[in-house]
Image (cartoon, coloured by chain):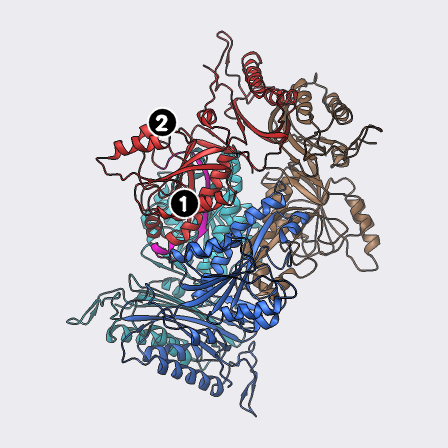
Chain colours: A brown, B red, C cyan, D blue
Amino acid sequence: MPFSRRFFSAATARAKPLSLHPSTKKNSRIGTLRVVGTDCRGIVAACTQVLGQYNCNIVKSEHWTDTQKRMFFQRLEFHHPNDDSVDHQACEDELEERLRTIQFSQSFLSQSNLEPTFDAATTQVQGFPLECHWNWRDRRKRVGIMVSKYDHCLWELLLRHSANELDMDIDLVISNHDTLRHVPETFGIPFFVTPITPETKTEQERKQLELLQNVDIVILARYMQVLSPIFLQHFPNRILNIHHSFLPAFSGGSPYHKAYDRGVKLIGATAHYVTEELDDGPIIEQDVMVVSHRDSVQKLKKKGRILERNVLHKALEAHLEDRVIVHENKCVVFGD
Amino acid sequence: MPFSRRFFSAATARAKPLSLHPSTKKNSRIGTLRVVGTDCRGIVAACTQVLGQYNCNIVKSEHWTDTQKRMFFQRLEFHHPNDDSVDHQACEDELEERLRTIQFSQSFLSQSNLEPTFDAATTQVQGFPLECHWNWRDRRKRVGIMVSKYDHCLWELLLRHSANELDMDIDLVISNHDTLRHVPETFGIPFFVTPITPETKTEQERKQLELLQNVDIVILARYMQVLSPIFLQHFPNRILNIHHSFLPAFSGGSPYHKAYDRGVKLIGATAHYVTEELDDGPIIEQDVMVVSHRDSVQKLKKKGRILERNVLHKALEAHLEDRVIVHENKCVVFGD
Amino acid sequence: MPFSRRFFSAATARAKPLSLHPSTKKNSRIGTLRVVGTDCRGIVAACTQVLGQYNCNIVKSEHWTDTQKRMFFQRLEFHHPNDDSVDHQACEDELEERLRTIQFSQSFLSQSNLEPTFDAATTQVQGFPLECHWNWRDRRKRVGIMVSKYDHCLWELLLRHSANELDMDIDLVISNHDTLRHVPETFGIPFFVTPITPETKTEQERKQLELLQNVDIVILARYMQVLSPIFLQHFPNRILNIHHSFLPAFSGGSPYHKAYDRGVKLIGATAHYVTEELDDGPIIEQDVMVVSHRDSVQKLKKKGRILERNVLHKALEAHLEDRVIVHENKCVVFGD
Amino acid sequence: MPFSRRFFSAATARAKPLSLHPSTKKNSRIGTLRVVGTDCRGIVAACTQVLGQYNCNIVKSEHWTDTQKRMFFQRLEFHHPNDDSVDHQACEDELEERLRTIQFSQSFLSQSNLEPTFDAATTQVQGFPLECHWNWRDRRKRVGIMVSKYDHCLWELLLRHSANELDMDIDLVISNHDTLRHVPETFGIPFFVTPITPETKTEQERKQLELLQNVDIVILARYMQVLSPIFLQHFPNRILNIHHSFLPAFSGGSPYHKAYDRGVKLIGATAHYVTEELDDGPIIEQDVMVVSHRDSVQKLKKKGRILERNVLHKALEAHLEDRVIVHENKCVVFGD
């Protein structure tokens, strides 16, 4: 399958048509399309032409070519007439076909700085095949949240969700402690406790995966356990974590203690996708805050909580709006 | 001429092919295209198709539709083969023709929130006609700088220019005082003094306009005189000013005194295009800095100088890279 | 009474000894002392000597003299032995006596830039008499919150209070609407509705004042009514408001609409004490956030909510920790 | 000598009375006093009393006690009558005597959280002896700047110095390359080239030390050589370096490349004192800037230059105003 849909395609497949999103107009549907792959001439035109043929109106688009690596990254947001005569699937299929054709037949840029990586003999593209991913705003992403004992990020997510500021459905909250049960229950969201010990970890993760089987994204809202590679495989680039330092500084445990000991004048927070390498996944969003010599570890923690929730929220928003493309352990994050 | 080229077209016309820009590859030319007008379906496709036909490779693009006002804003950056067989002018002409055709023939979006403003009887577009503006990176913009007695913004411009960080040619520096003569002269840039009194202002402005007749942009790098409407008419959206406050707060004179008196906890700087209404032109860039009760007016001025030069520089960079479109006294500023 | 205790003294008087604050050590008491008045030599020494005599250990202090206006501002934080043998009142009284003596007897600085404003004939100080204000951490400030329909600032206050991050007691929440009843009730905090119409305003304010009679501070957490001068008189420099713009820009109503119309590149929030002049009270804290041409009014509001709650919280923290001195419509805010 | 003056005392001793600083009033002298040591009751009073006795007027003071480590840090800024009858040396001597007495005779705090570390048997203070350091504003610090090939930090220092914004005298600029000769020469500042190879390093450093023998501070304004421990011994806590990352992230070489490879969303700069451990000295100041996926290494470098010069300048200002106390590899930085 040379033409995979790697980005969140499982998510899209699983997501059932849920309640119509308030911002969707009754006679139009809002969609996003992300395209990524080895750059070749004509991609931009191909995407826009097909969308035009199917009566889509593009309202926002951003594209960037990494000219050194010849990689192409694009995001399009469009309005699509929402009447029954329109075959959305046909539109998706045709675009994918068109993009595949372009990539295999067209000659690549031959400018001096963009050496062709095209092997004429085999007609094989020596690059990263074009992928495209469609999403429809009215299919809201389903979310599972994992927490331990800190409640500030959890409150942030639940409050902003209840204020209709986060375009997602929260299916459940899982914790390794019973401490925060009252928070999800305030909002009528199911809460499950899966206590972790070195002995029970494998079994509990199996249980967690079962609970999370219908979600598109897992948010680690200060979940203090390291997830196993097996767990991670189920959610490639779909587990968001908030780390309480400006990575790569102070990775691992107790970043505020380390920041205090080093005497830094800024503390930070980093939201990233979780990969097997601890705290080394692709960074979505970072922010920092000024601190002083007067700040004890306790005070750094208190100040940092504001950063953590804001950075997590901002990263989540980017993810939910399909503004992120992950490539080679980095995130391309398009504008909001 | 319904299809005007309002943005900087005079500038482009005047700019002579100057020294080849270092970042331009020997066998390709870098160009930018900005398109603005009433939104209609097919614009994005039209632009990209024509560029494709003429062998351009788009390396960066950003577009945004103001769905409430139905306005379309786009910027494309592309590489164009630089061989003699390519007719750049034909490419430009064809795109303009195509855009004109689209706008007049195509039906507009008829989604509920995008009511057509199309008058069938007259076949007149009831909107803002599509405009497009081409620029070629190897035609560097020519700049005239105007200053009074403060030197920090002037040094910033000349130093960063001499470090090849600003893609422009500085033709001259004009001042109403002789104070800063040594600064441009350090860099071998011509310096002219046009002392202003209420009586001589008209005459001196005439002289200034003569000196500036070949420049594309005028930068007011802390020039403390108000320019007359006659002067402004020569440079619509092409005079950049740095104001030392976060506008609209503290417009007019002595903003640091006003900030001190009001007891604000932040001071700011604003770069904007100059219009007849004082300090009310379209804002390109703003930034602020924390201050405290301990800061005297003198100290606010000192701190503010850092802001002023940084904000002016950032705005200028956006202008030089053709990342700004002015519309109804606001700036659309595309990403860097 | 030439030696008044203007700052929050009413509040201190009213505040009953509440539950012992967790950060107070069992055998020591934490206190703060703020001194403000016309600068004269020996003030710093006088304060520290008296505190020393009564066995206080100063753990943090900050002082600043406005040399132009000859005003002295100081804040001291100290640990006081908490055994019955210590007469706190005597300590307070002695310091006040000492400060009064200093101001009347000592000659003023006679440096060239600090001309004496001392009238020898009458032995009257021609300045602002020294005031000092004591507070004890174990007497927590009592707070009344007023809201309308926006809940983000209210949630912020109640959540951070329940997380022991705000050193205060929340007595009640008052609103002119019933909309947010569920929020205080989640935390078991009394909620009162006082619907306001032009006809009932006077009567409702009377009722509000009755409800608030035991509180030290009133927090307007997005309360959308203008308070009458009569109301304000009850809480001089003790009503905190959050305004959703970087004042003085966009004072009055609909600041996000005004920001959108002006096309600013930053939005802001300002926390200030309420005075009779609308949105013109002394500023405690301000912050801003970058926005772009793509942000609709709706999106500015959404982004701004994060600013509003953070700025309000930061200002409140400063107030609760006795780090603010108001003087001539400005705030001296000491470091945290 | 139990009562050493470790902070910059060598510097003060060496600094000859240079040109009278413009901000010094003709009949008063501005001084700063920093005191650091194990906290004990009465220190604040002792300092202020002695200054009072000698007719000093304190215009600004800040003190902080690290209650966990029982360390005391204070900075006082005062005006001192500048007539011949005043014996400045006597004032300094008396204060030192008083502080010594306090520390040895007074009982320490015996609050539960501040266990005495006082050994009654030996009457030895089990802590860090009190140190105090005097500086007089009219004895400007003498500075040597070391650079390699990047000019942005050097220009910043020389321009701001020539604008009277940095209260210091620049004695000379040293480089391991001839590249930047024109910069100091623009300002009439002596420039010396000491080319470094592995073979010549020892010899060249000896030469550099000779050139720098009269300076108080060495500023590494992007000097790309590692200084030997022998060199460092001559300037304990008196060599300021600017590192182009938010330390401890990306220490060592090529931080912008590392930042690009990691895909961070912020880049930073750190000003610190140089110690034997590379990039691990006490941090004075840090700042960051937002970057995006579109930023190449080249663009990160360009953006970072603005950060570097600003952070270096801010740290230098703190150092020059005697607002920094170094303790256990951290900086206490008092407010400006």
Single out the mark in the foreground, 2 or 1: 1
Q: Viewer-proximal residue, A34 or D311?
A: D311
Q: Amino acid at mark 1?
A: Leu
Q: x, y percentage for residue D288?
A: 55, 52
Look at the image and say whether residue B226 sits in the magenta stretch: no
Of residues B125 and C171, the one drawn nearer to the viewer in this rendering: B125
Region of the chain picked out in magenta, as a range = B279-300
Q: Please report, as a chain letter, where disc 1 is located.
A: B
Image quadrant of residue A98? top right
Check the residue under mark 2 and report the chain it is in: B
Instruction: Identify the residue position indicated by label 1 in the image.
Output: B154
Q: Is residue C200 left or right of residue A55?
A: left
Q: Quadrant of the N terminus of chain C?
A: bottom left
Going from N to C along the chain, the mark reached first, 2 or 1, is 1
Quadrant of the rendered structure where residue D29 is? bottom left
Q: Quadrant of residue D116?
A: bottom right
Image: C19 above or below C225: below
The residue positioned 64% from the left and 59% from the top of the image is D252
The residue to which callout 2 is attached is B233
- The residue shown at (43%, 40%) is B271
